[in-house]
Amino acid sequence: MEKYAAQYVNLSRNIRFYRKLARLTQSQLAEMADISTGWMGHIESESMITPVSLQTIFAIAEALGIHESKLFEKREL
């Protein structure tokens, strides 16, 4: 898992970036993506290298109104 740590951190940052851009709370996005608020928190946490299913990524992207590829783009701090 550590092999892909940077990619997980990037995914977390992008989800958080687009969520804030949409002016949504973690709870709101979690509800829209049909996942728990706790799981949403884990996904967004850069310290939690958490495998995420494609189904969850697709649901988050759909809830944010963006193409899922946006969640994988390299984002600098």
Image: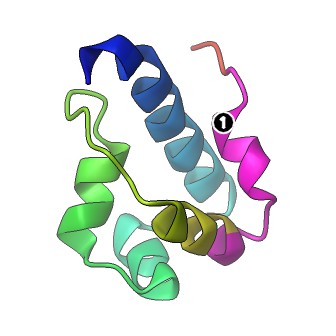
Which residue is found at the position 59% from the left and 39% from the top?
14
Question: Image quadrant of residue 38?
Answer: bottom left
The answer to whether residue 24 is visible is no
Q: Which residues are magenta?
A: 62-74
Instruction: In the rendered view, tell whether residue 66 sits above or below residue 4.
Output: below
Q: Quick check: 46 left or right of 12? A: left
The answer to whether residue 9 is visible is yes
Secondary structure under the numbered disc 1 in the rendered image: helix
Tell me the kind of residue under disc 1: Phe
Question: Image quadrant of residue 12?
Answer: top left
Q: Quick check: 1 left or right of 65? A: left
Q: Quadrant of the N terminus?
A: top left
Nearest the camera: 24 or 70?
Answer: 70
Nearest the camera: 32 or 53?
Answer: 53
Q: Quick check: 62 left or right of 77? A: right
Near mark 1 (Cα within 10 A), the count class, few <14, some 14-19 or many ≥20, is some
Q: Main secondary structure of the magenta part?
A: helix
Residue 30: where, in percent of width, then height?
Answer: 40, 76
Colour mode of the rendering: rainbow
Residue 10: where, in percent of width, then height?
Answer: 52, 27
Nearest the camera: 49 or 76?
Answer: 49
Is residue 34 on the magenta stretch? Answer: no
Q: Quick check: 27 left or right of 2? A: right
Which residue is found at the position 43% from the left and 67% from the top?
25
Question: Image quadrant of residue 49?
Answer: top left
Q: Which residue is mark 1?
A: 72
Is residue 68 on the magenta stretch? Answer: yes
Instruction: In the rendered view, tell whether residue 59 sits above or below residue 76.
Output: below
Which residue is found at the position 57% from the left and 14% from the top?
77
